[in-house]
Amino acid sequence: MTEFAIGIDGGGTGCRAAVTDRRGTILGTGKAGAANIMSDTATALANIVASARAALESAGLSIPLDHAVAVLGVAGANVGPYGARIQEALPFKASRVVTDSLITLCGALGDADGVVGAVGTGSVYGARRDGMVREIGGWGAIVGDQASGARLGRDLLEAALLAHDGVHPAAPLTERAMAEFGGDPERVVEFAHTAKPKDFGRFAPLVFEAAGSGDAVAVAIVKAGAQAIDASLDALLWPECRTICLLGGLGPLYRPWLSADHRTLLVEPKGDALQGAAALALELLNADGGGA
């Protein structure tokens, strides 16, 4: 009998998993490395499986993965063949691959209506209205993921190069960024050409730290990110909506930079993306019926 469900939150920085029983009790959790299915599918799959195994070990369960069902929420599940390829390769008895937006929404809102934004290494948004779900964003750092850690890091390095060339004024943050590369612009460019979203994302805390100190470049970057979040929220809000949840590693940092209209609607989420994935996995387990 299949008695266990595994919810997996596959993030661009790290992968988390939680195993539950049929009552929805979380028995154990596990972590592994990044799960970016668009930029490194093989590594993402390995980390997804590793996080699930770690969750089972944490729960004291020595069962094969094909004795459990799983729901994976991951950026890129809505783009081309990436989600389908991962789902085909997953070793569980039954599995479902959904967007990171959906697991975030389910975790934050439970069964309620509202708008949710998740801003971390990437960015994605979702809304539930009268039972209908709409998702936007999550298109990856090259052409999307505005306000994300990856975009903040990229924007910082661009600003550092412009300051180095004398096109824009330098600031303490641009000088600090250049110092990371020994003051050599060619090293910045070499890094940028091979960097993954998480590599750019490691600069995001520096940007927020500098913005808090009034650094002009940092303030401009963070304000642009906040405006992108405001625009995405506006695209999903409706007049009667009274709930916005902003999650992800950078979500709380952006709160004071959002428009006043959005700040008044911010509420604390009921749960996080991993809890949302676990809830969807439990639904899959119950739908599966517990067959052998």
Image (spheres, helix red, strand yellow):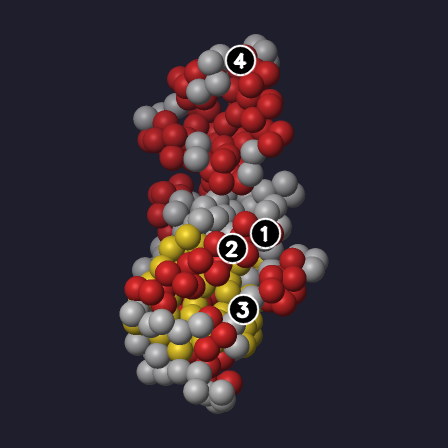
Name the N-terminal-most of marks 2 and 4.
2
Q: What distance separates the C-alpha of mark 1 from that of mark 2? A: 6 Å
For label 3, count other residues whose C-alpha is less than 10 Å away and answer few (under 14), some (14-19) or many (20+): some
Q: Earlier in the sequence, mark 3 or mark 2?
A: 2
Q: Are marks 1 and 3 in contact (CB under 8 Å)?
A: no
Task: Specify the label residue 91 is tagged with.
Answer: 3
Residue 136 x, y percent position in the rendering: 59, 58
Of the pair 60 and 188, the residue shown nearer to us: 60
Which label sits on residue 46? Answer: 2
The answer to whether the residue labelled 1 contacts the one labelled 2, judged by CB atoms less than 8 Å apart, is yes
* Mark 1–mark 4 CB contact (< 8 Å): no
The secondary element bearing badge 4 is classed as loop
Tag 4 and tag 3, C-beta contact below 8 Å: no
Q: Could you give the CA–CA distance between mark 3 and mark 2, rounded to whole angstroms? A: 11 Å
Q: Residues within 10 Å of mark 1 (few under 14, many from 20)?
A: some
Residue hosting label 4? 184
Give SS at disc 1. helix
Q: Which residue is mark 1?
A: 42
Q: Nearer the viewer, residue 108 or 264?
A: 108
Question: Mark 2, mark 4: which one is toward the viewer?
Answer: 2
Q: Which one is nearer the viewer's eye here, 184 or 122?
A: 184
In this rendering, does residue 219 appear at all? Answer: no
What is the spatial separation of the Cα atoms under label 1 and label 3, in whole angstroms? Answer: 14 Å
Q: Is residue 187 above or below residue 289?
A: above
Q: CA distance from mark 4 to mark 3?
A: 46 Å
Decide: is 160 above or below 17.
Answer: above
Q: Residue at x 55, y 43 (%)?
A: 146
In the image, residue 48 sits, relative to residue 110, either above or below, namely: above
Q: Amino acid at mark 4?
A: Asp
Q: Tell me the CA gap for discs 2 and 4.
A: 35 Å
